[in-house]
């Protein structure tokens, strides 16, 4: 064991911190390197679509080596590279932004001794020699040795064993045992201790295993479903491509030769002619495959999520697992904690009532009553896991401990020796600290009144004298009155006898602390929002029944006489079947235990409900993991965050409602993109399949197809990725967790608009009265240029159709500035291609009249889709995607 310079009592000073960092390094863990841009670019060039285009280009080169248009070839190669480059840079930027935002928002903090004071610092600032303060729920920030206290630690991430590992103070620093050491990345189950840091960063045990421990986030269920949908559509496209090629060749080789064998043989053996038809058949196949295979579909979820990350973080929502935000929009029932989530979490002791029923509203008032004050101060000060930091703010412990500590603000010297401490447990609902008071052992007990008061036979009067309790009726009446007004009550007592966790007897009552935690005004808004979203909210709290009901009423959770409020004991008495029957009416669970959460989740899931659960403590971790969506609080323990899918950074219920809204928005954005893309697919496939048999040659070139493909995938994906979260989404019923991506509304719009677009394209190319608008007598290229513009501008108008089910296509348009910018970019590039594309894009500049005529034909998809929407409205089908 190397020598470590530190001071256990005061910790390191600023100079020692700097020297230690220079000598031993920082506490930064080298993370796995993200895939670079070049690797993504090479992977993009290996995309099946790009391969098919390159193969087709190679075949074309071989067949037409002498008369081949090398200018077009180079142009196509450049276009392929640009398409891959833009796709790769978009993916690279999205993934990098996603990783950076997660890393910044997930920074952990820990408590250390610095310059003789307790300070809260970021984990990466920890250095060798630091004295770290650990308590239940903390994640160990570096390897170290215990110098005070004891812990039970979860080391399952290293050894795979679920049982907690006991840790004790090291007696010999030269030969420390494993039982004296804690390791970075492990989690404290129980206890509290001070630890001297011995290793930091990559030198920790965790750091040495970092490359094996760090895993790439698995593909989310929605992304897998999108990939499955893309695969099905792709197979249809591939089969269609083969059928069209075979049908075309059969038509020219057999049908056109009147089924005469001699003519067929003569035709086939005419190599240049046959080669031209084979090349044309391959071009048809490539056309269908390029427009039919939605290779960008699986990436849509990453694009949508990365584009929404900043917006979600601004709303204090950090997504840890993609499955969490995907499933959030489907939640049917939400179990929520009270403290800090529905309430402000800033507990304040509004008064202290002594055993003779006198109330004191400040420490100053208490200090005027003689010998009772020191007893109250000891009860609040020693039986407390909180301490003041350098800024004189209470840190550590739970928020109740911090509130009690802040009630006693003066003369905070810890002059009495603490012998033992049994921390508060949600099952037992009390804590015990044993101190030496004038050489005598004294047990300080705090907890729920119903756990303490029944065992109190005496109380302290104002002068600190012990009196016999004659009646508890008035005490209970006062407690009941306070709890019915939403006030939390904590009882304090002492005993000079041996006290254990199984029984109390003959306690002396010190008094009661009345603690107020105000409801957040925004939480009331959040509860209302969730209620309108047809989501049942159930508040789970450790408060007694009266306090819980009062707060639930104020928050808007308890609204009707039919609503149920049950205690943990009442819940336990009901069978699973009984609980399933009353579950729709359940609104509050009071005096809850961690096991209640797990049971309620199981029962709800058996009722085929999608369950959301909030939590912040060590005991909440199993429930957070079991829920369909686990919401951890930003101020919660690290173990609860590790178990969660989403972290609510401000602990606010309204932020949970916003997370649900974002979940619904993301799913809708993906569906809107699918409507747009598959509408283009239906049009293109229909045109490619029917066209050759009615005399419509390949209407677009390979390089034009690349531009169309870019519009369909990368640019359209970007446009729809920033769709705003609309409150109207919260008025809809939750989607089923496994609901198919394609619903009836989408299929109808895709087929209806897609088929209309196909008919319009065929009429545009084959109808003489349309052709005469585009100087076909002078040059057929003007018509083909107009058709290229028609196809792109139809897509642009369809973007507006797809993004809203309303008749007003500009509804909430200004909330998606990226959509506007993307559409303008496509329009500008398309105009440049039409007027300056030349031979490369097979375009010739249109006159203003021709351009406006083309736009008018393209815009007809809007009134046609209006007719569909009006028809659905008359039938009462207004829901959209």
Image (tube, rainbow, N blue to C red):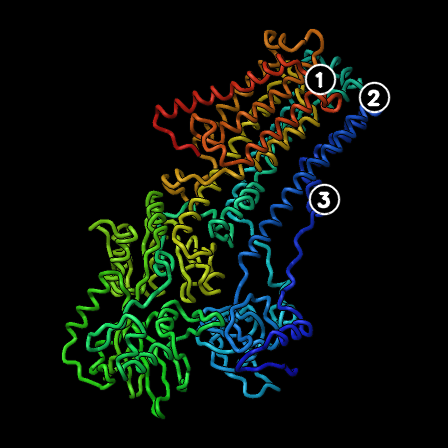
Report helix, strand or loop for mark 1: loop
Q: Residue at 58% of width from left, 30% of height from top?
A: 823
Image location of residue 632, percent across then percent down = 44, 58
Q: How many C-alpha atoms fall within 10 Å of the one at disc 3: few (<14), some, or many (≥20)? A: few
Judge whether 143 appears above or below 740 on screen. Answer: below
Q: Are marks 3 and 1 in contact (CB under 8 Å)?
A: no
Q: Nearer the viewer, mark 2 or mark 3?
A: 3
Report helix, strand or loop for mark 3: helix
- The residue where tag 2 is placed is 67
Q: CA distance from mark 2 to mark 3?
A: 31 Å
- The residue where tag 1 is placed is 844
Q: Nearer the viewer, mark 1 or mark 2?
A: 1
Quadrant where the N terminus lies? bottom right
Q: CA distance from mark 1 to mark 2?
A: 22 Å
Residue 42 image label: 3
Q: CA distance from mark 3 to mark 1?
A: 34 Å
Residue 744 located left or right of residue 126:
left
């Amino acid at each position: 064991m190397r020598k470590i310079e530190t001071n256990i009592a005061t910790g390191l000073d600023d100079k020692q911190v700097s020297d230690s960092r220079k000598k031993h390094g920082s506490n930064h863990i080298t993370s796995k390197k993200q895939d670079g841009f070049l690797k993504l670019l090479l992977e993009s060039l290996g995309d099946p679509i790009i391969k098919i285009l390159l193969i087709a280009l190679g075949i074309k080169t071989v067949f037409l080596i002498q008369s081949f248009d090398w200018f077009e070839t180079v142009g196509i190669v450049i276009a392929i590279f640009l398409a891959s480059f833009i796709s790769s840079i978009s993916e690279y930027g999205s993934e990098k932004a996603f990783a950076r935002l997660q890393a910044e928002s997930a920074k952990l903090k820990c408590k250390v001794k610095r310059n003789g004071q307790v300070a809260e610092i970021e984990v990466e600032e920890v250095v060798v020699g630091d004295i770290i303060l650990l308590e239940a729920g903390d994640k160990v920030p570096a390897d170290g040795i215990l110098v005070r206290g004891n812990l039970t630690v979860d080391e399952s991430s290293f050894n795979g064993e679920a049982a907690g590992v006991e840790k004790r103070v090291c007696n010999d620093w030269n030969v420390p045992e494993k039982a004296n050491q804690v390791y970075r990345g492990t989690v404290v189950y129980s206890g509290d201790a001070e630890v001297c840091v011995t290793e930091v960063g990559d030198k920790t045990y965790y750091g040495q295993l970092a490359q094996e421990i760090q895993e790439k986030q698995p593909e989310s269920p929605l992304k897998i479903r999108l990939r499955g949908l893309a695969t099905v559509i792709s197979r249809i496209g591939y089969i269609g491509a083969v059928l069209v090629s075979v049908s075309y060749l059969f038509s020219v080789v057999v049908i056109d030769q009147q089924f005469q064998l001699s003519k067929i043989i003569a035709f086939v053996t005419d190599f240049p002619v046959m080669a031209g038809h084979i090349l044309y058949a391959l071009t048809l196949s490539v056309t269908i495959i390029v427009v039919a295979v939605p290779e960008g579909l699986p990436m849509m979820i990453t694009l949508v999520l990365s584009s929404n990350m900043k917006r979600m973080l601004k709303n204090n929502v950090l997504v840890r697992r993609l499955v969490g935000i995907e499933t959030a929009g489907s939640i049917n029932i939400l179990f929520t904690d009270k403290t800090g989530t529905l309430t402000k979490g800033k507990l304040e002791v509004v008064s202290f009532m002594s055993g003779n029923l006198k109330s004191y509203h400040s420490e100053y008032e208490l200090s005027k009553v003689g010998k009772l004050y020191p007893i109250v101060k000891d009860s609040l000060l020693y039986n407390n896991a909180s301490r003041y930091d350098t800024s004189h703010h209470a840190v550590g412990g739970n928020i109740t401990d911090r509130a009690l500590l802040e009630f006693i603000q003066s003369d905070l010297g810890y002059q009495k020796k603490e012998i033992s401490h049994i921390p508060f447990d949600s099952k037992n609902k009390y804590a015990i600290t044993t101190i030496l008071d004038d050489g005598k052992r004294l047990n300080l007990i705090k907890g729920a009144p119903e756990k303490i008061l029944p065992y109190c036979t005496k109380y302290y009067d104002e002068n600190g004298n012990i009196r016999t309790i004659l009646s508890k009726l008035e005490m209970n009446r006062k407690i009941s009155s306070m709890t019915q007004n939403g006030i939390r009550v904590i009882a304090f007592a002492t005993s000079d006898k041996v006290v254990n966790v199984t029984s109390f007897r003959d306690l002396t009552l010190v008094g009661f602390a009345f603690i107020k935690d105000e409801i957040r005004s925004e939480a009331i808004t959040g509860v209302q929002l969730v209620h309108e979203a047809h989501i049942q909210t159930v508040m789970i709290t450790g408060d007694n029944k009266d306090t819980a009901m009062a707060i639930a009423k104020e928050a808007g959770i308890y609204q009707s006489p039919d609503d149920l409020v049950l205690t943990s004991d009442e819940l336990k008495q009901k069978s699973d079947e009984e609980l399933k029957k009353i579950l729709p009416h359940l609104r509050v669970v009071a005096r809850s235990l961690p096991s209640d959460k797990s049971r309620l989740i199981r029962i709800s899931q058996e009722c085929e409900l999608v369950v959301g659960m909030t939590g912040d403590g060590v005991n909440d971790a199993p429930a957070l993991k079991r829920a369909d969506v686990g919401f951890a609080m930003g101020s919660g323990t690290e173990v609860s965050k590790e178990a969660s899918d989403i972290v609510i950074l401000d602990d606010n219920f309204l932020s949970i409602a916003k997370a649900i809204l974002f979940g619904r928005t993301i799913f809708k954005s993906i569906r809107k993109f699918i409507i747009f893309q598959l509408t283009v697919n239906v049009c293109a496939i229909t045109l490619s399949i029917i066209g050759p048999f009615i005399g419509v040659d390949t209407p677009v070139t390979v390089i034009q197809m690349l531009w169309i493909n870019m519009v369909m995938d990368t640019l359209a994906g970007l446009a729809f990725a920033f769709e705003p979260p609309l409150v109207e989404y919260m008025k809809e019923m939750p989607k089923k967790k496994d609901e198919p991506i394609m619903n009836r509304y989408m299929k109808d719009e895709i087929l209806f608009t897609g088929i209309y677009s196909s008919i319009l394209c065929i009429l545009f190319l084959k109808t003489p009265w349309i052709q005469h608008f585009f100087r076909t007598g002078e040059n057929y290229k003007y018509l083909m240029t107009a058709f290229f513009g028609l196809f792109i501008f139809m897509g642009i108008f369809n973007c507006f159709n797809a993004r809203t089910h309303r008749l007003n296509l500009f509804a909430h348009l200004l909330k998606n500035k990226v959509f506007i910018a993307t559409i303008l970019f496509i329009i500008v590039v398309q105009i440049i291609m039409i007027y300056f594309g030349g031979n490369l894009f097979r375009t010739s500049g249109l006159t203003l009249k021709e351009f406006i005529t083309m736009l008018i034909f393209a815009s007809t998809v809007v009134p046609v889709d209006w007719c569909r929407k009006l028809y659905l409205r008359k039938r009462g089908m207004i829901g959209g995607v």
